[in-house]
Amino acid sequence: MIDQDSIWAHLDALAKPRRSLGRLESVAVRLAQTQRRIDPRTRPRHIVLFAGDHGCVADGVSAWPSAVTGLMVTAILNGSATSNALAATHDCALRLVDVGVAGGRPADAPAFFRDARIADGTASLAHGAAMTVAQFEAAWSVGEEEADRAVDAGAAVLIAGEMGIGNTTPAAALTALLTGIAAADAVGSGAGADAETVTIKKRIVAQAVGRAGAMFDEDKCAAIASVAGYEIAAMAGFYAQGARRGATVLLDGYVTTAAALIAERLAPGTVRAMIAGHRSAEPGHAASLMHLGLEAILDWGMRLGEGSGALVALPLLDAAAALLCDVARLDDIGAVRND
C-alpha cells in the first residue's frame, strides 16, 4: 500500500514549483490513496443511477408527487436527463437500475436499464419501518452486483447517482441517526420544499430517528433499514463492493453520502476508497462529510442529484491523474533546486 508521504514526495519531485497546483495536488494524493498506486486510472468510469419511490411522500415531505420519479426514469431512459448529458460529455458509461419505482416498466427499455425492483417503493417512515431487513439486504445485494459488473468491465472510477422523489427525507434521517446531529439540522428543502413542508419533514424525520435510535444498539441493520430507501441501500452496497474491488468511489451529494454513511458503518474501511465530488446545498451534507473525514472538491450549491455533482467534478480527477502520471520529474529534465 502506498502511503501519503510517498505520494507527496512524488508530486514535489515533479517539474513544477513545489505545491504550486494547490488543491489539485491534494486531490491527486487522495486519488492515489484510493487506488493504492502512484499512477491511478480514471478511465473507464461508470455511473449507476439507482431509482426508488418513498412512501413518506404521501405524508407531505416533498414539493413533488411520487409520479415524478417515474417520469424522470423515462427521461433518463430517453437520454434526455441532466445525468445523461453530463455522463456523455465526460465519457462516463451510464446505467439505470430500478430497485423500487412504482408503476409499469417499459417494454422496449434500452440495454443500460436493469429492472431489479424489490417493491413499489418503501413504506412510509412516518408511521413505521420503511423496509424490512430482508428488503434492505436485497437492495444492498443489487448494489454489490452492479459494482462487480462495472469493475469486471474495467471501471477504475465508480459513481452512484439516485432518482427518488422524497429521498432527502430518509437521507436526513440516516444522517441524523449515523452522525448524531439533531434531526432538525439534517433537514433541508430538498427539491424546493416550502417552509411548511420543511416543518412537516423535520417532525417526521425526528420521530423516525427516535424510533430507529431506540433499536440501534440491539440491531443496527434493522435500525438503518427502518429509515432508508431502496436506492439508498443499493448505493451503500455499491460503494462497499466497489471499495472492496479496489475502485475509486466518487460521491455525489446528500443522498449518496447518506448511503456512504451506511456503507462505512456496515463495511468499515469503505471510506478509504471515497472522494467527495461536491458539497450539497442541503444543510446536513457538511455534517455527513465531516463524519466521514472527507473534503468536497467542489462547493457550488448544487442539489440536483442523479450523480450530477460527481460528474461535474470528474474532470478534476482526470487532471489529478494526469499530474501524477504524465508530468516529468525535475531530475529528468536536469533541473536542480537551489534548496
Image: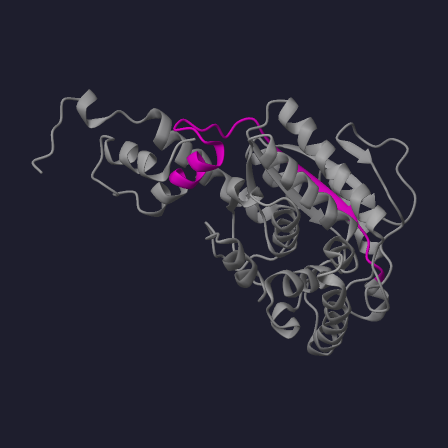
The image quadrant where one finds the N terminus is top left
Question: Picture quarter containing residue 33?
Answer: top left
Residue 248 rendering spot, x and y as whole percentages: 53, 36
Asked whether residue 169 appears in the rendered view, the answer is yes
Asked whether, in this view, residue 294 is left or right of residue 60, the answer is left
Q: Is residue 332 found left or right of 254 in the rendered image? A: left
Note whether residue 77 is visible: no
Q: Is residue 256 above or below residue 86?
A: below
Q: Is residue 161 left or right of residue 118?
A: left
Residue 104 in the image: state x and y as whole percent.
92, 43
> Which residue is most to the front?
218
Provide residue 78's location: percent of width, then percent of height.
76, 37
| Residue under the image location 65 percent in, 69 percent down | 187
Q: Residue at x 22, y 35 (%)?
A: 16
Magenta stretch bounds:
28-55
Quarter assignment of residue 178: bottom right
What is the quadrant of residue 74 in the picture?
top right
Which residue is at 41% across, 32% downward?
A: 321
